[in-house]
Image (cartoon, grey):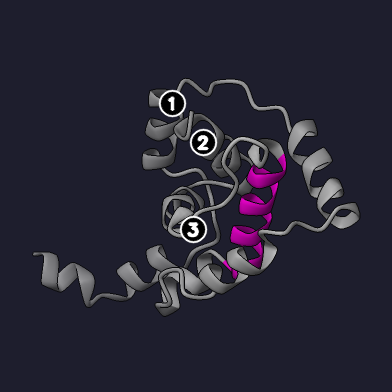
Amino acid sequence: KFESFSNSSYADEKLTRPIEMTLRGRVWKLLLGLDHISAQQYIDLIKKERVEPLAFYDKIRSDSFRTFPHEPFQRQVPEPRIIRVLNSFVHKYGQYFGYVQGMNAICAPFLFCMPELDGFLCILRHDR
């Protein structure tokens, strides 16, 4: 049954649809205790990125383009989304530990199954 599903046009459509909150995304948010989302903090961090470039930016860029380089993933989670989330994370917690290689692989699954803001807040909660 899986082979017939994975080869169907239905599977192609489901894998390439625009980002939306999937059941998996909802479950992760519940497990991480995120029920109320405020966008202002994330917006402020994105604005800060434009004013104060990070020393970690080059490291983030060198990892982000390699994050799950398969076509369905790249289409659903463009590299700029990963970069924004990781830069914002480092702006918030950089004084404690900054960016380390592999954080892109933690970030990517969240962004694959939920909107960018929710993914950012899951990363904040996940790395506590």
**Residue 14, above or below 116:** below
Neighbours of disc 3 within 10 Å: few (<14), some (14-19), many (20+): many
Q: Nearer the viewer, mark 1 or mark 3?
A: 3
Q: Read off the residue under disc 1.
A: 32
| Structural distance between the alpha carbons of marks 1 and 3 | 19 Å
* Front residue (pair 69, 72): 69
* Front residue (pair 94, 77): 94
Residue type pointed to by label 2: Cys
Query: Which label belongs to residue 111?
Result: none
Secondary structure of the residue carrying numbered label 3: helix
Neighbours of disc 2 within 10 Å: few (<14), some (14-19), many (20+): many
State if disc 3 and disc 1 touch (CB < 8 Å).
Answer: no
Q: Quadrant of residue 8?
A: bottom left
Q: Main secondary structure of the magenta part?
A: helix
Q: Read off the residue under disc 3.
A: 104
Q: Read off the residue under disc 2.
A: 122
